[in-house]
Each structure stands twice: as C-alpha cells, then as structure tokens.
Amino acid sequence: MSDAYPTLQQWERGPRIVAIGGGTGLSTMLRGLKKYTQNLTAIVTVADDGGGSGMLRQDLGMPPPGDIRHCMEALANTEPVMEKLLTYRFTEGSLSGQSFGNLILAALNGITGSFEEAVTQMSHVLAITGRVIPVTSADVRLEAVFENGARVVGESQIATFKKEQDCRIHHVGLLPEHPGATPAALEAIGDADLILLGPGSLYTSVIPNLLVEGVAQAVAQADAPKIYVCNIMTQDGETEGYTAADHLEALLVHGAPGLLDLCLVNTAPVDPELLEKYREEDAVPLTVDRERIARLGLELVECPVASEGGNYARHDPDKLAQAILDIYRRRAMRIFRGERRYILEE
C-alpha cells in the first residue's frame, strides 16, 4: 500500500467517493479519506432515537443530529478551539449529556426550517472537506424483527431487547416504510467513482440507509465499484456469532441484487487485553469465512487496517484509507459477457 499523500491538484481531482453508514465507524473512515480527496460524500442514517440526539428529536421534532455531527467533526477543517466546542458535552443541568455540536445543528434547523439545509449551513461554517447528507428528511424509526417473531421499535432499544430474546435479528425495517431519499443522496450515488458501505453497526447504522426508497437500487445500478468495509469485531446486542459472510448476507437481503462487489476485512491482530474486555460482552474478532464469501459472488481483500492501542478495536483511519484507495487505483471496470466485473489491473 502506498502511504504518499496526494498533491493539492491530485486531492482536488481525487475520486468521487460516497460512504454510506453512520456512527463512529463511518466518521473514523472519513478522517482518513479526506486526506486523499476533496470529492467525498457521507450519506448518513437518521434513525437514531437515543442519547442527546433522541432528546432533541423528542423535544424539537427534528431528525437526530448525532451521526451527522460525528461525520462533520471528522471532515471539519477548524481551529482547535472550535473542535473542542463541537465535541464538548454538558455534564450538569437540563443539558447534561448533550453535545454542543448537536445544539448548533438544532439552532440551524430552527433558523433554516430544514434539517437538510441546516446540515449544509453547518458544513459551510466548519469548512468541511466534502459533503454530509442525511439519507432522508423523513421522521423515521427503526423496527427490528427477531427470528422468534418478536418485534421492537426504536434503535436504542434493539440491543437490550435482543439480549432478552436471546435470538438473532431476522430483519429490520423503517417506520414509516419506504421514506423518500434526499435527492442529493441519490445524485451523489449515481455520480460516484467508488461506493463504500460501513464500517459500523450492521443493523442500526448501515442497513437503515438501504431501507430508504431508491437508495439500495441506486447503489446496485451505479457503475462504481461497491465495497463493504467489514467491522473488526462482532457487536454485543446486535451481531454476536456473526461471521463476515453473515454480515454480507444481511446486507444483500436488505438491499438489492448487485449491491456489492467486494468485501474488505482486517487481518491485523487485536491486542489481547482488548480481546479479554470484548469477551466479557460476548464480542470476538470477526471470522472471515472465505468460501462462503466466494459463493456469494463477492471478491475478498484482506489488509491489516486495525488501529494499534486505544480502548477499542477500531480501524486506523490512515491505514483504512490507504487500503481503500489502493483497491480503487488497482481496479478498473471491465465488461465481460454483458456483466459488470471488477478485476485487478495487470
């Protein structure tokens, strides 16, 4: 993998990358990618109903700003003081637990009368690299249906409910069903040179985007290579016992034929002390079942992209960005018997 950063001209003309997801996984990836291209678009879920975002959603009737804010923080080009302000979280009073960045978005939402416009205006204020787009402007909630037929509504309720049911999630859906996608999101997908799904919580950060009307179809029909960036670990209360192929199958079931071309997985070992911590939560490093992935018709790329040190097993922003750009540079679309196939350039 090349670790050379592009020149300014190369950065300005960099590939048009669309990253779809939410949560800390998406924002971590964006921190690395913004060094390689300014043509970066994050399409972000708005199904969150917990924490400070949930409070603002309930009190002000606005879409939850948390995942959007994380992405803008990752892409922001601001002074250190502003960076600290964005991430500051109140610890006392009625604002306890609330992020200052969330409040800025809430204020802009009130001023502009549109959450999508509020995100655009905050992007200008923060001089972010690229764009952040909510996947829908609709007021949506996430419903999980389990293999035993039980159901629960609310993204923040799923993990606890799953533990109580002690069975896998069968599928998730949005309420109301098939909300309309923001036009900017569909346009960005159609114009992309490279489309990324994940990393992040499978059922609560990545898949909800695919349930918005037209999004999965737009991804499947796009000419760009489509890569799923696998999580490093299984997730407590969501994907215990899942392999890499299980993640991919869930995406394909909730998406559309042709949704993915390739799966990128980590090969770097996780620190033993971290592993012990995760075992207490029934979380383990993701098993890469190569034969099942091949049977799904997807290519597999394995790279050491995990961060070293830290309190969590997460991707290293720079290593992940380098791996993604390396795949992009080495691959070209070829037409073979009327089918789209992405093969290594010789």
Image (spheres, helix red, strand yellow):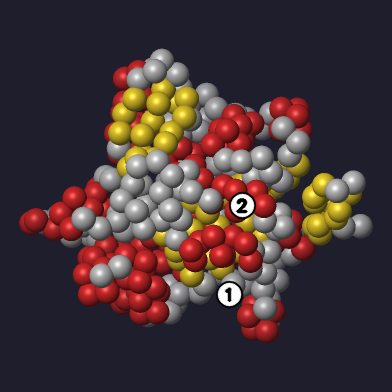
Nearer the observer, 97 or 201: 201
Nearer the observer, 29 or 21: 21
Nearer the observer, 269 or 224: 224
The residue identified by callout 1 is 38
Asked if residue 23 shows in the view, the reply is no
Q: Which residue is located at x 64 percent, y 83 percent?
A: 8
Asked if residue 102 shows in the view, the reply is yes
Q: Please, what secondary structure does the residue beneath circle 1 have?
A: loop
Q: Residues within 10 Å of mark 2 (few under 14, many from 20)?
A: many
Q: Is residue 195 above or below residue 239?
A: below
View extreme (bottom): residue: 9
Q: Amino acid at mark 2?
A: Val
Q: Which residue is located at x 57 percent, y 33 percent?
A: 253
Image location of residue 37, percent across then percent down: 62, 72
Q: Which residue is located at x 50 percent, y 74 percent?
A: 129
Q: Earlier in the sequence, mark 2 or mark 1?
A: 1
The residue identified by callout 2 is 219
Image location of residue 229, percent across then percent down: 60, 47
Q: Is residue 294 above or below residue 180?
A: above
Image location of residue 18, percent across then percent down: 58, 61
Q: Is residue 268 above or below residue 144?
A: below
Q: Using the numbered discs, state the Cα–Cα distance from disc 2 to disc 1 in whole angstroms.
A: 21 Å
Q: Which residue is located at x 57 percent, y 47 percent?
A: 216
Q: Residues within 10 Å of mark 1 (few under 14, many from 20)?
A: many
Quadrant for residue 196, please give it: bottom right
In this rendering, position of residue 133 left or right of residue 95:
right
**Numbered badge on residue 327:** none
Q: Amino acid at mark 1?
A: Gln
